[in-house]
Amino acid sequence: MKTSWRSASLAAGAAAVLALTTACGQEAGPSASSQNVGATAAAGDYGSAGNAGTGIGSGLGNGVASPSASASRATPAGKLAVVTNPELGKVLTDSGGLTLYRFDSDTAEPPKSNCDGDCATTWPPVPADDVTAGEGIDKSLLGEVTRSDGSKQLTIGGWAAYRYAKDVNAGDVNGQGVGGKWYALAADGKKAGGGGGGDGGGGGGAEAAGLPGLSTRNDPELGEIVIDKNGHTVYRFMKDSPWPMKTACTGECLDKWPVITPVDAKDTKGIDLKGSGPRGQGYVIFDRPDGLKQQTIDCVPIYTFSGDKKPGDTNGQGVGGQWFVIRPDGKPVGASQ
């Protein structure tokens, strides 16, 4: 009898642990039928093609460059140069004329690269060796950061520098605005042309003003809504499911609706962290079947919209009758649930 009681206790304990690890009804691991991670994830954080942000570029497809092409872009940058792009103004390039980019998910103080794996295939890091400053470039702004694999990557004003696998010719800027997170570098490390949502390196945008990773603002028409660290509006997709947590936005959908990557609860302001579900845990990370990790509010996966060009835009509201701005408690604005 004693043995049975202990066995029952252990089983109950295991069930409690399982309940915590499957908050929001999320499955314990990625689905075996997940899509090609390289293609789908690229559309999320590090982008695949089609300039969702600005429309600049050639509108290429979802594939990445061939291994040989990617390898050629991993070569040293040589003598950096500043060139004039008709849309973006002054843009930083390598010695071969290929545009250099920065990633909003990186940090400049301290310098840190958050682009690894498939991301680094689409966005090859620029090696820190054999780099010199050309005319119009302050050599004191050139530096390096140690990547997770131990290699050294070039930094400009603290921001890690990358090339884009789909920039084939000198002067191409196909990576500008991809996923709402990738922008051509200016010579001082800021975003060329003041791209998208401010500059986290000390410019005049929303992030520079000290916005948390997620917070709220009062929209004159929609009321209190959620915004990201760049001041961009946050949305939910009504075809997604919070209980159990599932997503219907995959593949090309992510080109227009980039996922919001995990944001620490301490880096939020005004967000309901409790949730209304049966386990009372709503601010959790969603392990998507395509391999991406996505932030949720009340177990609802959240996104930004590539059609929002600047902080305060709400161009995604009501798109397709399925996309709606989200409130701090995870409820959609203007949609019936």
Image (spheres, helix red, strand yellow):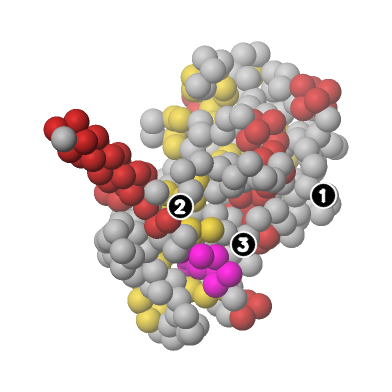
Q: Are marks 2 and 3 in contact (CB under 8 Å)?
A: no
Point 71% across, 42% down: residue: 36
46 vs 197, left or right, is right
Does residue 1 sit above or below 177 in this rendering? above
In front here: 274 or 2? 2
Majority SS type along the magenta span:
loop
Identified by mark 2, the residue type is Gln
The magenta segment is 229-242
Q: State the image coordinates of residue 136 (x, y, percent, origin top left).
A: 62, 33
Residue 117's mark? none
Which label lies toward us, 2 or 3? 2
Point 39% across, 34% down: residue: 109
Q: Earlier in the sequence, mark 3 or mark 1?
A: 1
164 vs 270, left or right, is right
Q: Earlier in the sequence, mark 2 or mark 3?
A: 2
Identified by mark 1, the residue type is Gly
Q: State the image coordinates of residue 243 (x, y, percent, origin top left).
A: 44, 63
Q: State the image coordinates of residue 279 (x, y, percent, origin top left).
A: 29, 59
Q: CA distance from mark 3 to mark 1?
A: 21 Å
In front here: 3 or 84? 3
Q: Report the residue marked by disc 1.
A: 61
Q: Report the residue marked by disc 2.
A: 26
Tally of numbered tags: 3
Point 48% across, 84% down: residue: 336
Q: Furthest-left residue in view?
A: 2
Element at label 3: loop
Does residue 168 sit above or below 274 in this rendering? above
Q: Report the residue marked by disc 3.
A: 248
Determine the image quadrant of residue 305.
bottom right
